[in-house]
Amino acid sequence: MKKLVLTTLIAAGLGMAAQGTLAAAPASTGQGEVHFTGKVVSNTCVITEDKTGVREVSLVTVPTSALNEAGKTAGYKSFDLEITGCEWTSGEGSSKVLAHFENTNQYVDANGRLKNLNASGAKYVVIELTDKNAQPINVITNSNNDADANYVTIESDGTTPNPKGKAKLTYGARYYATGAAEAGDVLAKVKYTLAYK
């Protein structure tokens, strides 16, 4: 079976807030300013699948005929990232979470899909990540991922007297042909950071 390895980079969401105000120059001078706002939270959940921080997803084996021209997809598989140990307070704090996929040249191609890292493996085949509705995620822009609707609510795990939070993030992956596929193995990786809202 072919494998897609998700290498996790778990970090607290960080933000910066610009402080102070500079006098805005008139637009006609070709000058302006940019204001940044953000928020730093202490809520860092734990990925429960594997203590090493790696989630492995085995895609089904598909024939080259299913990927015989650019743009074809095959072998779709849904997978979950389950998190626990989140700080949880009813009605307060960071109540939603998602996996923000990281754009790294080592793993991501120019179209936001995941490169086949197996140099002697399948040719003209990459991996396309999707959201829970099988809509493609462009890892460069995180389109179809970072929208408000894709954040998952952190729920209580029911423990007493101090409950923690938990959530299940659902994504998908499939082969994507960049040309007429040639047979071979596929290995792809992507890093992500848990983002809170």
Image (cartoon, rainbow, N blue to C red):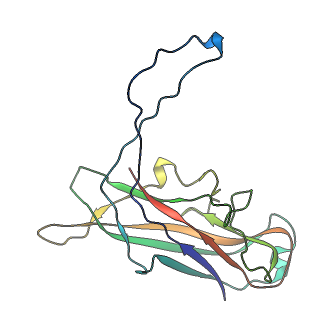
Q: Position of residue 54 (x, y in %)?
A: 50, 77
Q: Is residue 144 left or right of residue 114?
A: left
Q: Is residue 51 left or right of residue 78?
A: left
Q: Position of residue 86 (x, y in %)?
A: 29, 64
- Please identify the quarter of the rendering in which residue 127 is found: bottom right
Is residue 24 positioned above or below 59 on the image? above
Is residue 172 positioned above or below 144 on the image? below
Outermost residue on the left side: it is 161
- Please identify the quarter of the rendering in which residue 110 is found: bottom right
Is residue 111 positioned above or below 24 on the image? below
* Camera-nearest residue between 149 and 52: 52
* Camera-nearest residue between 26 and 136: 26
Q: Is residue 132 left or right of residue 163?
A: right
Residue plotted at (55% across, 66% down)? 191
- Please identify the quarter of the rendering in which residue 178 is found: bottom right
Task: Locate the N terminus and report the quarter of the image it occupies.
Answer: bottom right
Q: Position of residue 133 (x, y in %)?
A: 57, 62
Q: How many marks?
A: 0
Q: Position of residue 159 (x, y in %)?
A: 18, 72
Q: Is residue 35 left or right of residue 115?
A: left
Is residue 145 positioned above or below 118 on the image? above
Residue plotted at (52% across, 28% down)? 34
Residue plotted at (58% across, 69% down)? 172
Outermost residue on the bottom side: it is 1
* Camera-nearest residue between 162 and 109: 109
